[in-house]
Amino acid sequence: MSSAGAGRRERPAAAPGGGTVLRRAARAEWGPLLRTVRTALAASRLRAIPLTLTAVGLTLVFQFVQNQAWGYRAVQNIGSVQADEHLWLALLRTPLSLFVPALDLPVWGALAQILVVFGIAEICVGRRQTLAVAYLATLAGTMYARLGIWIGPVSPVGLPDSDKYVIDTGPSAAVVGLAVFVCWRHRAWFTCAAVALAMVIEVVSIKNNLAGKEHIAAILAVLVLCGMQELGRPRTAPGDAPDVSGSAHPR
């Protein structure tokens, strides 16, 4: 080998068109969403997600308090939901139940879900819609628990009577609902379908319990909301791009 060619290495040939197709598909799927998030964080940093940071802080407070002998009952009284309670009491507790971490799951999982999904949603659709969708998804799970127990275990969509004593807290239903809502608004159809399919597989193959079925209820409720918004959306003229940025949504 000559000295001139010793330091020269040929670059391996790329697969013809494969990488380009994947990059193009990824840009089409996540490009608008990532640009919106990147722009907001570059301009305002953490000031872009005050709601998300508040939710993370509230979850940490509840986690600390409920693990103290003096605080467990207080947290249960204001944020614990069970299907055997009176409906009005469950409805009063449902908003705060979103921020009460489940005792049998690691709190870092709840914090990560809130930070990532709530943060993206707050930037992309605004604070008011993030709160509204999170509450809708959580409420759908709360109401499903009562309906599922009434139907009973004889049906695939029903629940055993023992589930009415399960403490039903945590952000997972809200996180799933927000993920579907943001993907729908930003036309990330594949990701939207993947989230929904993953929740169905969870119920069918992994976790056929109250929490898993509540995730399905949350997705269905959010899809109904998305459908209603689509029906009320003004039709764009041919050639006009639909508005999927978060900047147009009030905060």
Image (cartoon, rainbow, N blue to C red):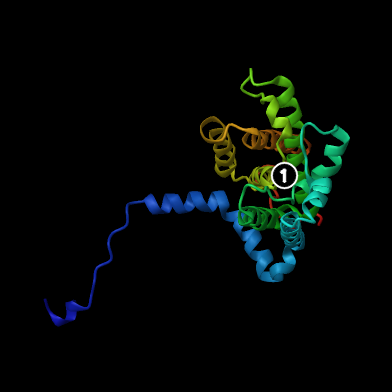
Q: In this view, does 71 lie to the left or right of 166?
A: right
Which residue ends up furthest to the top in the rendered image?
Answer: 154
- 246 or 180, nearer to the observer: 180
Q: In the image, residue 220 lies at what x, y percent? A: 68, 33
Q: Position of residue 230 (x, y in %)?
A: 73, 37
Q: Going 43% across and 49% down the picture, which residue do you hit?
A: 21
SS under mark 1: loop
Residue 114 location, quadrant: bottom right
> Which residue in the rendered view is the most extreme toward the left?
1
Q: In this view, does 188 lie to the left or right of 125?
A: left
Residue 234 seen anywhere in this rendered image of the structure: no
Q: Is residue 27 above or below residue 41?
A: above
Name the side, left or right, on which 44 lies relative to 108: right
Disc 1: which residue: 169
* Kind of residue sitting beneath label 1: Thr
The C terminus lies in quadrant: bottom right
* Residue 223 appearing in the image: yes
